[in-house]
Image: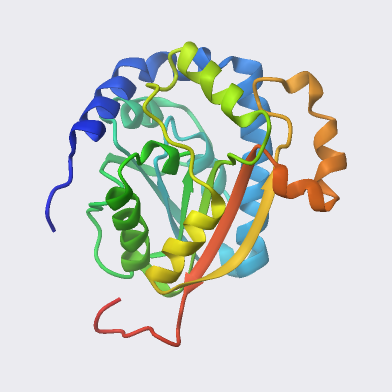
């Protein structure tokens, strides 16, 4: 497969290598922990909804864009094994050096050129990666890679910033100001993900907005319980989208 290490990905790779050791601190420890708790629970609940607790224990997962590996390690406690990839070797190095109950593998890789064989994983998760995929073709290729390396009965889970939320653009501005992001990011609407799912023969399984109050404002987090129980969840600062391979068009010779 052709290497797609574009100018944008090179800039991002250098940026995240440079900030790897200060990544959590730049976000803010309290805000990071608040977001981590909300997101890890949301992802695990989605995996349990699809696999069930006992079946999940036997599954092999991949976290694309793993960052410092906190969510990777958390999910690893509930499945057979986890691997994490990130565009930045610095992030992978930081992830490897963290002490934890679980020990996933971490390796650098581009999201649209993944170093794995077809149908390698039972599930794939990806948190806050897609707004970094500035070029439309890279986003499309990333979803096609998800489809290629997930097993026929597997699950693909994407979490990203929801442009519909009234706070999301302010939050992204603050992330850039704090030096967490580069300023090149482009927020992706959930229906864009669904569109590319369909183009890659992926059937939607689950969708939900969550974390209405952004992680940079943890003092307002009690509002999340209210919004999460109403149709207003679609305005969550983040969304989670999950999909499964479409068996009606699945061809085992070309997964």
Which quadrant of the rendered structure holds the C terminus?
Answer: bottom left
Residue 46: image quadrant is bottom right
Residue 49: image quadrant is bottom right
Q: Residue at x 73, y 30 (%)?
A: 213
Residue 180 horizontal side relative to residue 166, left or right: left
Residue 134: image quadrant is top left
Q: Residue at x 39, y 72 (%)?
A: 151
The foreground one among 53 and 221 is: 221
Q: Residue 217 placed where, x, y %?
A: 71, 20
Q: Residue 186 placed where, x, y %?
A: 43, 36
Say above or below: 200 vs 60. below
Q: Residue at x 35, y 41 (%)?
A: 133
Q: Residue at x 30, y 84 (%)?
A: 252
Q: How is the image coloured?
A: rainbow
The foreground one among 177 and 47 is: 177
Q: Residue 79 placed where, x, y %?
A: 53, 57
Query: Is residue 240 something one can see in this rendering?
Result: yes
Query: Is residue 120 something one can see in this rendering?
Result: no
Q: Residue 87 placed where, x, y %?
A: 29, 36
Which quadrant of the rendered structure holds the N terminus?
Answer: bottom left
């Amino acid at each position: 497969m052709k290497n797609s290490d574009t100018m944008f990905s090179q800039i991002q790779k250098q940026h995240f290598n440079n900030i790897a050791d200060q990544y959590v601190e730049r976000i803010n420890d309290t805000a990071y922990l608040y977001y981590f708790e909300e997101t890890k629970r949301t992802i695990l609940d989605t995996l349990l909804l699809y696999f069930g607790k006992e079946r999940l224990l036997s599954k092999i997962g991949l976290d694309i864009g793993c960052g410092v590996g906190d969510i990777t390690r958390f999910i690893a406690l509930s499945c057979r094994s986890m691997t994490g990839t990130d565009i930045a070797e610095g992030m992978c190095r930081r992830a490897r050096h963290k002490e934890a109950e679980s020990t996933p593998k971490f390796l650098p890789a581009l999201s649209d050129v993944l170093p794995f064989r077809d149908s390698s994983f039972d599930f794939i998760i990806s948190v806050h990666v897609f707004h970094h995929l500035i070029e439309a073709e890279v986003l499309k290729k990333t979803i096609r890679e998800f489809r290629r390396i997930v097993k026929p009965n597997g699950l693909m889970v994407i979490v990203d910033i929801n442009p519909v939320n009234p706070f999301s653009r302010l939050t992204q501005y603050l992330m850039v100001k704090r030096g967490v992001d580069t300023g090149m990011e482009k927020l992706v609407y959930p229906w864009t993900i669904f569109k590319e799912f369909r183009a890659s023969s992926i059937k939607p399984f689950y969708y939900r907005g969550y974390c209405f109050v952004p992680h940079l404002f943890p003092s307002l987090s009690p509002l999340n319980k209210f919004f999460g129980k109403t149709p207003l969840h679609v305005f969550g600062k983040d969304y989670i989208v999950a999909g499964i391979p479409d068996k009606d068009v699945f061809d085992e010779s070309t997964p």
